[in-house]
Image (cartoon, grey):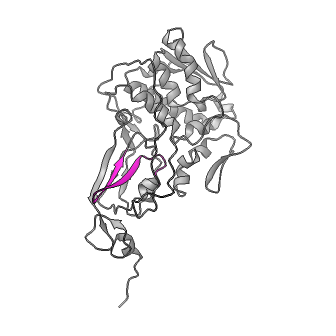
Amino acid sequence: MRALCSRVAYPQSGCRLCTESCPADSIVFKDGYPHVGAGCLECGACISSCPNGVFLPRQNRDIDILLPLVPSIKKRELQTIHYRCSNATGASRSAVQLNCLGRLTEFLLVAPLVFGAERIVLAKGDCGNCRYSRTISHQDKIITASRLLARAIGIEPNKIALAETGAPEEISDAHVPPPDRLARRAFFTSIKSKSAGLAGMLLASGRTIEQDQRAQVRQHNWRRTNLLAILSRLECRAELEVQQDILPAAEITVGHECTGCGLCSCICPTGALKNSMKEDLFEITFEAHLCTACGNCEQACRFKAIRSSNTFNLKRLFDQKPQTLLRAAMKSCDSCGAGFIHSENDICELCRAETPKLAF
């Protein structure tokens, strides 16, 4: 799944989530790709810290953890789900034991509630003195994001609780404003698997929109796919503006500075940004539910045409509809022959920038 890595798609990416969350410092980049070294503690922090789904668990995938619980949840035999850190004290018959709670994802916390569980209880160990202590801030983000998702679908956020207190701390207004309305609670008996194809074709270069003849199919982001499989079957009526550092997604806009080079879609690791030609019109579409706010597009755009917001409307994860960001007539450059838009000149902006200025 390394092709999903933001740094693989764009080597100058500033993403360091996996290396910053790894308590063993075992993740290194060699030849441009992430590698997990022999010192791995199998805590799972890299799995849940990477929103692009680059890392796959060797065993006990999210769906493997959840599926054995579903029959008992639906029969009301299992109403409280316990996720227990391996260093936590106490025990529970229904406990799912993890090396570290840093392995949890939003899917593992929200999906049981959707199926009918009454409560999720998280049993932490002594995180401050644990060798996995670097994952603490990441754990907090996952819990906060999961509570926000629960609120959006009309489930009380305090149903996701810490074992020490039995009740969670309040969700800070810094993460989300008070909702005007809450959606009805919905329960579903099954979740159909999504198509494995969240795929797109790589472009031949950043200056054309022709498909690469050696096209590689984009690997799909299993983390986001699992979450979307739940949310797409639920109703969201709460207009929640969420910070992207809590739940990675973004709102993207494309301005008139765009030249139609196509670089943004080429370096988007998840396929959230796509461009196409329809007759003589160049078009950029954006699928917010696939975006993980990696920032590649905004950082790489030479003309600063792309801008992303620090917050996004949570409802976009439920709607899962593509949005047309730009549509403009395309013409050919007299110098290089490449297509470009938004210019009254006959030579594209890149050629103009590369043409030496004559001194008189």
Asked whether residue 35 is drawn in magenta, I would say: no
Q: Quadrant of the C terminus?
A: bottom left
Q: Position of residue 259 (x, y in %)?
A: 34, 63
The answer to whether one can see residue 133 in this image is yes
> Most extreme residue toward the front, as rendered?
213
The answer to whether one can see residue 137 in this image is no
The total of numbered circles placed on residues is: 0
- The answer to which quarter of the image holds residue 347 is bottom left
Q: Position of residue 90 (x, y in %)?
A: 66, 15
Asked if 274 appears above or below 122 in the picture, the reply is: below
Asked if 344 appears above or below 107 in the picture, the reply is: below
Q: Quadrant of the N terminus?
A: top right
Q: Position of residue 13 (x, y in %)?
A: 52, 54
Q: Position of residue 300 (x, y in %)?
A: 45, 59
> Most extreme residue toward the bottom, as rendered?
360
Asked if 89 appears above or below 351 in the picture, the reply is: above
| In this picture, residue 133 sits left or right of residue 359 | right
User: What's the residue at 63%, 38% (across, down)?
Assistant: 134
User: What's the residue at 35%, 58% (across, down)?
Assistant: 305
- Which stretch appears magenta? 267-286
47, 308: nearer the viewer: 47
User: What's the residue at 40%, 20% (across, down)?
Assistant: 155
Asked whether residue 279 is drawn in magenta, I would say: yes
| In this picture, residue 61 sits left or right of residue 232 | right
